[in-house]
Amino acid sequence: MDNPDNMMLYDVNTIANYDSSIIPFLNAEIGSEFEKREDGHFYLVI
């Protein structure tokens, strides 16, 4: 995040086409934060 050259905005449909594992989280409460860890699972960030 310190370098804006490392950030891009993408349509969520594009991301879901690459990784459908995000689909169950699309209706999460606004402000929810999730992290996908090395094991491939998402975890709620508290």
Image: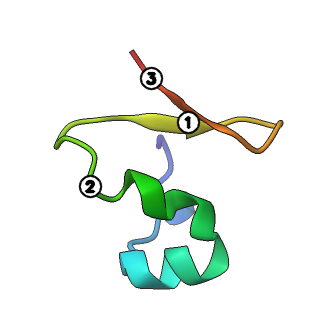
Residue 35: assigned label: 1
Q: Is residue 44 above or below residue 1?
A: above
Residues under numbered marks 1 and 2 in contact, where contact means CB atoms less than 8 Å apart? no
Q: CA distance from mark 1 to mark 2?
A: 16 Å
Query: What residue would you read off at disc 2?
Result: 27
What amino acid does circle 3 point to? Val
SS of the residue under disc 3? loop
Give the camera-side residue of 43 and 11.
Answer: 43
Q: Residue pushed farthest left?
A: 30
Residue at the spot 64% in from the left edge and 70% down from the top edge: 19
Q: Residues within 10 Å of mark 1 (few under 14, many from 20)?
A: few
Residue at the spot 45% in from the left edge and 70% down from the top edge: 8
Residue 18: assigned label: none
SS of the residue under disc 2? loop
**What colour scheme has been applied to the protein in the rendered image?**
rainbow
Q: Earlier in the sequence, mark 3 or mark 1?
A: 1
Q: CA distance from mark 3 to mark 2?
A: 16 Å
Q: Residues within 10 Å of mark 3 (few under 14, many from 20)?
A: few
- Where the C terminus falls, by quadrant? top left
Query: What residue would you read off at disc 3?
Result: 45
Q: CA distance from mark 3 to mark 1?
A: 6 Å
| Residue 17 visible in the snapshot | yes
What amino acid does circle 1 point to? Glu
Q: Position of residue 43 (x, y in %)?
A: 56, 29
Nearer the observer, disc 3 or disc 2? 2
Q: Position of residue 42 (x, y in %)?
A: 60, 38
Horizontal arrangement in the rendering, residue 11 relative to residue 7 (left or right):
left
Q: Position of residue 33 (x, y in %)?
A: 37, 35
